[in-house]
Image: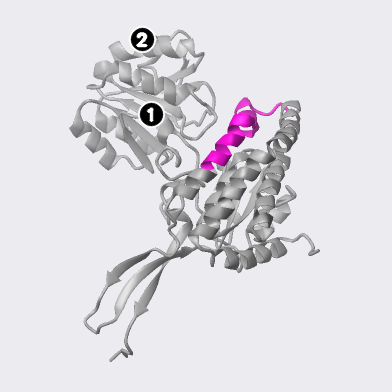
Amino acid sequence: MNKLTAENLARAAAQAAKIVAQLTTAEKNHALQHMAASLRRHQHDILQINQQDVQAAQQQQLAASMIDRLTLNAQRIEDMATAIEEIIQLADPVGEVTPFSQPSNGIEVSKMRIPLGVICMIYEARPNVTADAAALCFKAGNAVILRCGKEALASSKAIAAALHSALRDCGLPAELITVVPTPDRSLMLDLLQQQQWIDLVIPRGGEGLIGFVSEHSKIPVIQHYKGVCHLYVDRDADIDQALALLINGKTQRTGVCNALEGLLVHQDIAGEMLPRVATALAEHQVTIHADSSSAHYFAKPNVIADHAFGEEYLALEIAVRTVPSLAAAIEHIDQFGSGHTEVIVTNDQAAAEQFIRHVDSAVTMHNASSRFSDGGQLGLGAEIGISTSKLHAYGPMGLTALTTEKFVVRGQGQVRA
């Protein structure tokens, strides 16, 4: 057995990537179906091991949001299996050919979509990412190396064991899905130097993790920074609709990157809107951080200065600000947003179009909950992450974002003059 080194892990994944790149769509879908079935078959074992991870996290008194992300149950495992089955139904981008040009010299130029090769995912306490990332990378013709946080390592290894069982059943190498078996930070650093074997790194987690990976990697990095998402209520908004979007976006699930962290209300509607906001958020025990012009609408707000916005709370907390105009709302988002998801509530179509055109974020929404900023909800199947950088992907990353294109030239013996 090869010694556990970053180079050996990466080299083995690169060799396996050559195999998956040659599979047909039918062969990949067949293996994915086995993966979904194996997750269901091994549900009991996965849940037992996950319970140990959760108990350890509770003993360490980790944040409630982290424990929520770490926790698996029967429904969440079923969701993972269902997500794989949804990926099966998606069109396979690999091998897709797009005509590009036909120069006067008679050559025919097209572009063909191909796998990236080996993708390294580095993520924190979210064991479901193990299955989602593995299935997406596999369908896109890539091998994947998965390095999760120590809190979820046992759970991720259990999920990977179920997926490896499916790969064996299909005669495919386990190295197509590699979970780094140790949380050793030096091994992660070594992985980030393996540019000969790894083609792309995708960190998914807190700002510190992403900054660390970006600083130390010799491999291109897709950044998935924090989700400071805003709901802007314009003066022509339907207040009932705005309240529903606020409550859904803030309270349905707090520890996720598409949860709302900021509420902006046009001053013309603040007197009618904010008292109802205060009542609704109090019912959900949401802590309010408000600017001085909004604070008096709330019972016990934490009054914050104009420079103190932009926090990612990942909890039942939200920042509230009254703004004088749509332009001021956009300016606030430009200063404090994270490029993730921004929402406008308005019945003024022109205002909505201005917001959509000028707000710089991966996802902009009009009269819809920020919680829809998710690959599965947007029709991508399970996502591998939400890119807040613009090269080479922006927003939720599905199958196509895990491939690239090469030029294909067909001729009849032409030579360049």
Q: Which sits in the foreground, 413 or 300? A: 413
Q: Which sits in the foreground, 317 or 291? A: 317
Residue 243 vertical placement versus 156 (above, below) = above
Amino acid carrying label 1: it is: Ser
Left or right: 183, with 280 as reference point: right
- Please report the residue visible at 28 percent of the width from the left and 92 percent of the height from the top: 417
Instruction: From the image, give the main secondary structure of the stretch colored magenta.
Output: helix
- Please report the residue visible at 33 percent of the width from the left and 71 percent of the height from the top: 110
Q: Which mark, residue 369? A: 1
Left or right: 223, with 97 as reference point: right
Q: Position of residue 62 (x, y in %)?
A: 68, 29
Q: Position of residue 378 (x, y in %)?
A: 40, 40
Left or right: 411, with 87 as reference point: left
The answer to whether residue 211 is visible is no
Range of residues picked out in magenta: 60-83
Residue 379 vertical placement versus 102 (above, below) = above
Between the residue at mark 2 and the residue at mark 1, the CA separation in whole angstroms equals 21 Å
Q: Residues within 10 Å of mark 2 (few under 14, many from 20)?
A: some
Q: Is residue 194 magenta?
A: no
Q: Position of residue 271 (x, y in %)?
A: 29, 11
Give the position of the N terminus as an image quadrant: bottom right
Q: Quadrant of residue 292?
A: top left
- Please report the residue visible at 72 percent of the width from the left and 55 percent of the height from the top: 187
Q: Which mark, residue 275? A: 2
Amino acid carrying label 2: it is: Pro
Q: Is residue 69 magenta?
A: yes
Q: Which sits in the foreground, 364 or 52? A: 52
Q: Quadrant of residue 150?
A: top right
Name which of mark 2 and mark 1 comes first in the sequence: 2
The answer to whether residue 136 is visible is yes
Q: Secondary structure at mark 2?
A: helix
Q: Secondary structure at mark 1?
A: loop
